[in-house]
Amino acid sequence: MSARIISGVDVANEIRKEIKRDVENLKSRFNITPGLVTIIVGNNPASVSYVTAKQKTAKDLGFYSIQENLPEKVSKIELLSLIEKYNKDEKIHGILVQLPLPHHINEKEIIYTIDPNKDVDGFHPVNMGRLVIGEALFYPCTPYGIQQLLIKNNIETEGAEVVVLGRSNIVGKPIAMMLCQKAKGANATVTICHTGTKNLTVHTKRADILIVALGSPKAITADMVKEGAVVIDVGVNRIGTTPEGKARLCGDVDFESVKEKVSAITPVPGGVGPMTITMLMLNTLNAAKKSVEG
Ligand code: GUN
C-alpha cells in the first residue's frame, strides 16, 4: 500500500481564497485593511526565507504589510521600542517577531511585550494560557495548520491515539493541548514524547496519528510506525542545495520508506509549511475583524 499524500498546498490555497474574499469585504464594508508587521533580526538564511514568504503571501492577499529588518547587533531596548510603536499603531493588527533571536536578546521578554491582541503567532503567555483552557484568541500557526490539515482531509481525531514527538513551545506543546480539547477536530488521547522519553518506538508504534516535530532529518523510519497510521511531518531540515541554488529540504520522517506503510503522510516541502503561513494570515485577518467588532 502506498499512502495518500496530504497536500498542504491544496488546503492552503483553499483557505487563502476565503481569506482574500474576507479581506475585500472588510475593506469595502469597514474600510479596514488587515495590517501585519514582520520583524527580523540579523540574516539567518532560514529566517530570511520564512519572513520573505510571509511578506509575499500578505501582499498577495491584499494586506497592508511592513517588513522591519534589524541588524544582528540591535539592542534589546531598540527592539522593544519598535514593538511598542506597533502595539500603538492602529493600522497594524498583527506583530510577528521571527525566532530565533540572537543570544543577547531574551526571547521571552520580547514575546511578553507584544500586545496579546496583536500576537498573531499565539506565543504570548496570555494566549498560551487561553489555549490551554479552551478559550484561545489565536492558535500558534503551525499547530493551527496541522489541525486544519487533519480536518480538511477528514482524518478523525475523536478518540484517536495521537503521539507528538517534540515539546517545543511553538509546535509540540500547543498541538498536544489543542488536540486534547473537548472540541471538533480534537478530543484525542495525546502523548508527548521528548528527549527524556524511554523507548520512543513503543510510543510511535501505538500512534493512529503521529506528529513529528523533532528537528532531526529522516529520524522516523518505517519500523517505528504502525501500519495504516497518519503521519504529519513538521520537520524542515536543510540538507544541501539544489542545482538552481535553492535549499534542499527534507523532513524528520524518512518519507520514501514510511509512505509504503502508512495510510496518509505530509510531504516536505509542500505539507505543513504552506499551512503555517496561511494560518498566520488567518490570525491577522481575525485580529483585524476583532478591531472592528471591538
Ligand atoms: N520560527 C520558527 N517558526 C516560527 C513561527 O511560527 N513564528 C515565529 N515568529 N518564529 C518562528
Image (cartoon, rainbow, N blue to C red):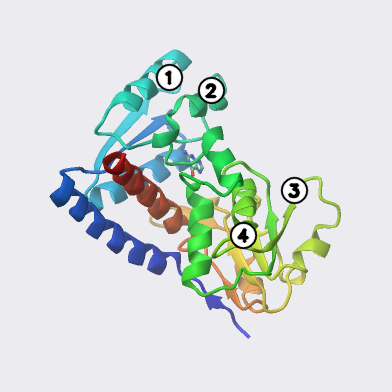
Which of the two labelled residues, at mark 2 and mark 4, occupies the earlier sequence position? Answer: 2
Which is in the foreground here, disc 2 or disc 4?
A: 4
Pointer 3 and pointer 1: residues touching (CB < 8 Å)? Answer: no
Where residue 109 is drawn, which disc sits there?
Answer: 2
The amino acid marked with disc number 3 is His
Query: Position of 108 compared to 288: left or right?
Result: right
| Residue 63 percent location from the top left of the image | 24, 45
| Residue at 63% over, 49% down | 172
Q: How crowded is mark 4: few (under 14 residues within 10 Å), some or many (20 or more)?
A: few
Q: CA–CA distance between discs 4 and 3?
A: 24 Å
The amino acid marked with disc number 4 is Lys
Q: Of helix, strand and loop, which one carries label 3? A: loop
Foreground pick, 94 / 218: 94
Give the vertical position of 262 relative to 175 (above or below). Answer: below
Residue 96 seen from this side: no
Pointer 4 and pointer 3: residues touching (CB < 8 Å)? Answer: no
Name which quarter of the figure residue 190 lies in. bottom right
Where residue 194 is drawn, which disc sits there?
Answer: 3
Give the vertical position of 111 relative to 138 (above or below). Answer: above
Which of the two labelled residues, at mark 2 and mark 1, occupies the earlier sequence position? Answer: 1
Residue bearing mark 1 = 80
Which is in the foreground here, disc 3 or disc 2?
A: 2
Which of the two labelled residues, at mark 1 and mark 4, occupies the earlier sequence position? Answer: 1
Give the vertical position of 132 relative to 89 (above or below). Answer: below
| Residue at 73% over, 70% down | 225
Q: How crowded is mark 3: few (under 14 residues within 10 Å), some or many (20 or more)?
A: some
The amino acid marked with disc number 1 is Leu
The amino acid marked with disc number 2 is Glu
Residue 54 seen from this side: yes
Which of the two labelled residues, at mark 3 and mark 1, occupies the earlier sequence position? Answer: 1
Residue bearing mark 4 = 182
